[in-house]
Amino acid sequence: MSVRILALVGSLRAGSHNRQLAEAAVKLAPEGVEIAVHEGLAEIPFYNEDIDVEGTVPAAAAQLREAAAGADALLLFTPEYNGTIPAVLKNAIDWLSRPFGAGAIGGKPVVVAGTAFGQYGGVWAQDETRKAVGIAGGKVVEELKLAIPGSVTRFAETHPADDAEVAEQLTEVLNRLHALVDGEQAAA
C-alpha cells in the first residue's frame, strides 16, 4: 500500500534551504512513499473565523485542507524566525485545525524537521511547531526529529540532497515514518 505524505515548508523564500530539504525528501522517499510539497501557503489569508464559513472558505485554504485530508501523514519543514515558528506555517496549522475537533490533520502522524542558520538548527521553532500541531489535533511523532544547524554556510554550495550526512539522516526519518504509517494502516 502506498503512503502519501504532505510536506509543508515554512519559508516562502525562493532559495529557501527548508524548501531544498523538502525537495531532498521527495528525492529520497523510499519505495511506496509519495511526498507532495504543498504550494500556495503564501496565498492563504490569515485565519479568521469570519471567512471560515462552509461554502465560502478561501480557495487556497480549501486546497490545503483537501491535500491534508488526502495524506496519510505530514512532514513540516520549518526555519526559525526570531526564535519561533514562521507565521506562514502557523497560519497553515490554524487552518488545518478547523473545524474544531474535526480538522484535516486530526490523528495523522506529523513529523517536524528543518534547518536554520543558528548552531541548533531551529530547535525552538521545531518545538513550537510540534506544540501547535499537537494542539491542532495532529499526532506528533516526537521520536522523529531532524534539526540541521548552519544552513547558510552548510548549504551555500551544496543542496541538502547532496550532503551525505543530511541525506542519511533524512532517509532514516522517512523510513521510520513510512514504517509507522504502514503499521497503522495494517492495524486498521
Image: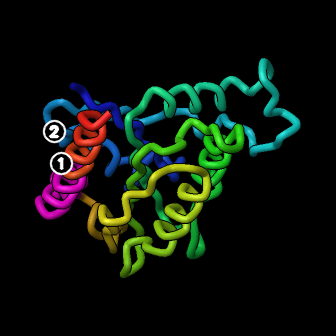
Q: Is residue 24 visible?
A: no
Residue under pointer 2: 30
Residue in the foreground of this view, choosing between 146 and 66: 66
Q: Judging from the image, what secondary structure is the residue with disc 1 in?
A: helix
Q: Position of residue 23 (x, y in %)?
A: 31, 42
Residue in the foreground of this view, choosing between 142 and 162: 142
Q: Is residue 110 above or below residue 66?
A: below
Numbered badge on residue 175? 1
State which region is magenta: 158-174
Please state which amino acid type lies under the numbered disc 2: Pro
Residue found at the very far bottom of the displayed protein: 119
Q: Position of residue 116 (x, y in %)?
A: 41, 68
Say if mark 1 contacts mark 2, CB within 8 Å. yes
Left or right of 180, for residue 116: right
Quadrant location, the N terminus: top left
Residue 158 picture quarter = bottom left
Q: Position of residue 187 (x, y in %)?
A: 27, 37
Q: Is residue 86 above or below residue 186?
A: below
Q: Is residue 89 visible?
A: yes
Q: Indicate whether residue 19 is drawn in magenta.
A: no
What residue is drawn where x is 78% and y is 18%?
A: 55
What residue is drawn where x is 80% and y is 21%?
A: 56
Left or right of 140, for residue 153: left
Q: What is the distance, in whole Å, between disc 1 and disc 2 at their CAs?
A: 7 Å
Please state which amino acid type lies under the numbered disc 1: Asn
Quadrant location, the C terminus: top left
What residue is drawn where x is 55% and y is 65%?
A: 131
Of mark 1 and mark 2, the one earlier in the sequence is 2
Q: Judging from the image, what secondary structure is the residue with disc 2 in?
A: loop
What residue is drawn where x is 82% and y is 28%?
A: 53
Q: Position of residue 99 (x, y in %)?
A: 71, 37
